[in-house]
Image (cartoon, rainbow, N blue to C red):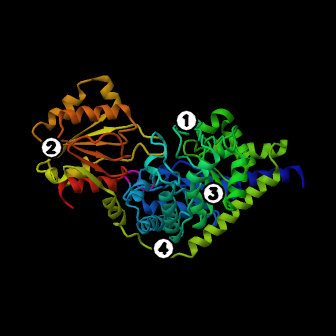
């Protein structure tokens, strides 16, 4: 083979293992050109979605270049949503489903989501998160997990995978080998899961085994150090973890896709191009990129880095070809999966039904609810991690105002409390004088400032109703506590219905 022909083939192989994102609600010319040159996958985010009709047009435009193109989306439902980022998810997330603990309900919710994605032309969903959230200080998983117990997470992983794939969309179990027992956000730094082999086998791996048994054909690697297996390299870059553990021990022969390769956990040490090469060398088959770096230059940089690494002998061409073959095999399988299922309309209400079932109450419920008058709602707003769209609305005040006209509300951020000590008195307590007060928090036990503000408000108003929309924890404060197990739009409606007596 001539040098120019070989270079062209290397570039085609390199492009085929990338799963890049892009900006816009129409496919840019560079993406269409890259598909013609060998790009086998793309991934969609909020910025690519304006409506179901537009999304279907976009996926049709992309597939006109390659009918077998893998079109992925990072759609967990729950707090991490792309298709409903502007309004909040109408389906509860994993933690709420785990709280209900009805696998048939979980399967129905996932099937409902799958039908919506299938109708829009999506073939791969980077979900579910099958991490066991065993560390309550975990800043990145939290309510994205089905729970803190491995058995609960495993049975709902099975249900979710079956539900989504029964609707014609491939699932992807993440973040291997388990991102639940860490205290660092891998978007910014390198977390470490310091458990021993026996604990990892008992705690983190069972949900992945359940996903494989349920028929999952894609697994996403996590950017975390697991010293029991590899003390030097994060899982995404570790041959011992991707090949030794996932391939050989667990017997997985499907597609291994990386978590977003631009995340700080891997780029701070290796750079985005170095991390890409090391991930493929370690056994990954596809590189997710573009949550943040979504321009043509990044895709070209990574394709060039892979081709150059082969030319320099740093990456075996056979390994790159094997990864490309796995991508193609997955594409063929996912197309068959989609063709086997007719496009069905979504039910429209299963998400709200599930969210209502996830609500839990404690305290003097019968003496306090429903509210006798429109309340003043105080929402304490945390800074969320990068997986959750900053534009995604959440809370109880808006749906409650629809049900109880006259409801007023204020949103308080940490920065406001730090800048002025009288904020709570002026904007929370004073407007609530002579009226019911509702305090809405999100992971109050994980945010010290929020816990303090909640305690101060509850001390001044022990009759207040507290709505926790994150992980339950900490002391019971207020007259009544309402736990929604997630901050979706569906969860906000469910809590508002309880407060207004609509249920």
The answer to the question of whether label 2 and label 3 lie on touching residues, with beta carbons closer than 8 A, is no
Residue at x 12% of width, y 36% of height: 433
Q: Would you name the residue on which mark 4 appears?
A: 343
**Is 84 covered by the magenta stretch?**
yes
Compare residues 29 and 8 and report the one nearer the observer. Answer: 8
The residue carrying mark 1 is 188
Give the foreground label among 3 and 1: 1
Q: Would residue 144 be found to the left or right of residue 320 on screen?
A: left
Mark-to-mark CA distance, 2 and 3: 52 Å
Residue depicted at 74% across the width and 61% down the height: 325
Image quarter hosting the N terminus: bottom right
Q: Position of residue 326 (x, y in %)?
A: 71, 61
Residue displayed at 79% across by 43% down: 309
In the picture, residue 295 is in which quadrant? top right
Q: Which residues are magenta?
A: 82-88
Determine which of the numbered discs, if any, sits on residue 41 in the image: 3
One can see residue 282 in this view: yes
Which-is-in-front pick, marks 2 and 1? 2
Q: Nearer the viewer, residue 419 or 463?
A: 463
Q: Note whether 15 is above or below 166 in the view shown.
A: above
Image position of 433 (left or right of 180)? left
Q: Which residue is denoted by mark 2 in the rendering? A: 436
């Amino acid at each position: 083979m001539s040098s120019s022909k070989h270079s062209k083939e290397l570039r085609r192989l390199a492009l085929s293992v990338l799963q890049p994102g892009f900006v816009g609600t129409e496919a840019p010319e560079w993406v269409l050109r890259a598909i013609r040159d060998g790009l086998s996958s793309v991934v969609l985010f909020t910025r690519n979605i304006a409506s179901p009709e537009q999304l279907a047009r976009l996926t049709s435009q992309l597939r006109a270049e390659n009918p077998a193109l893998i079109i992925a989306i990072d759609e967990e439902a729950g707090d991490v949503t792309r298709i409903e980022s502007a309004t909040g998810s109408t389906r509860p997330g994993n933690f709420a489903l785990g709280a209900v603990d009805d696998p048939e309900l979980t399967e129905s919710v996932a099937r409902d989501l799958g039908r919506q994605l299938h109708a829009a032309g999506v073939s791969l969903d980077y979900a579910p998160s099958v991490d066991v959230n065993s560390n309550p200080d975990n800043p990145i998983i939290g309510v994205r997990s089905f729970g803190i117990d491995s058995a609960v997470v495993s049975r709902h992983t099975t249900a979710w995978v079956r539900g989504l794939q029964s609707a014609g969309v491939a699932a992807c179990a993440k973040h291997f080998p388990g991102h639940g027992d860490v205290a660092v956000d891998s978007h910014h730094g390198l977390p470490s899961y310091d458990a021993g082999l026996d604990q990892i086998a008992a705690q983190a791996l069972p949900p992945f085994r359940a996903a494989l048994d349920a028929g999952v054909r894609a697994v996403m690697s996590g950017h975390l150090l697991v010293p029991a297996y590899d003390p030097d390299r994060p899982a995404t870059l570790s041959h011992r973890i991707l090949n030794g553990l996932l391939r050989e021990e667990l017997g997985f022969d499907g597609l291994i896709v990386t978590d977003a390769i631009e995340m700080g956990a891997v780029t701070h040490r290796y750079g985005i191009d170095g991390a890409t090469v090391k991930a493929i060398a370690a056994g990954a088959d596809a590189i997710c990129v573009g949550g943040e770096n979504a321009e043509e230059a990044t895709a070209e940089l990574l394709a060039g880095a892979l081709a150059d690494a082969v030319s320099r002998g740093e990456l075996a061409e056979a390994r790159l070809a094997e990864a490309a073959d796995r991508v193609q095999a997955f594409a063929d399988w996912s197309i068959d999966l989609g063709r086997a299922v007719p496009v069905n309309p979504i039910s429209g209400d299963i998400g709200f039904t599930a969210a209502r079932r996830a609500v839990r109450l404690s305290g003097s419920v019968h003496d306090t609810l429903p509210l006798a008058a429109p309340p003043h709602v105080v929402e304490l707003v945390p800074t969320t991690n990068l997986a959750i769209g900053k534009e995604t609305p959440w809370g109880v005040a808006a749906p409650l105002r629809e049900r109880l006209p006259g409801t007023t509300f204020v949103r308080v951020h940490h920065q406001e409390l730090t800048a002025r000590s009288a904020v709570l008195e002026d904007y929370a307590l004073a407007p609530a004088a002579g009226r019911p007060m509702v305090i809405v928090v999100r992971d109050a036990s994980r945010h010290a400032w929020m816990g303090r503000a909640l305690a101060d408000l509850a001390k001044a108003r022990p009759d207040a109703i507290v709505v926790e929309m994150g992980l339950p924890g900490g002391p019971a404060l207020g007259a009544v506590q309402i736990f929604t197990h997630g901050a979706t739009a569906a969860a906000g409606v469910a809590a508002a219905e309880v407060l207004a007596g609509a249920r």
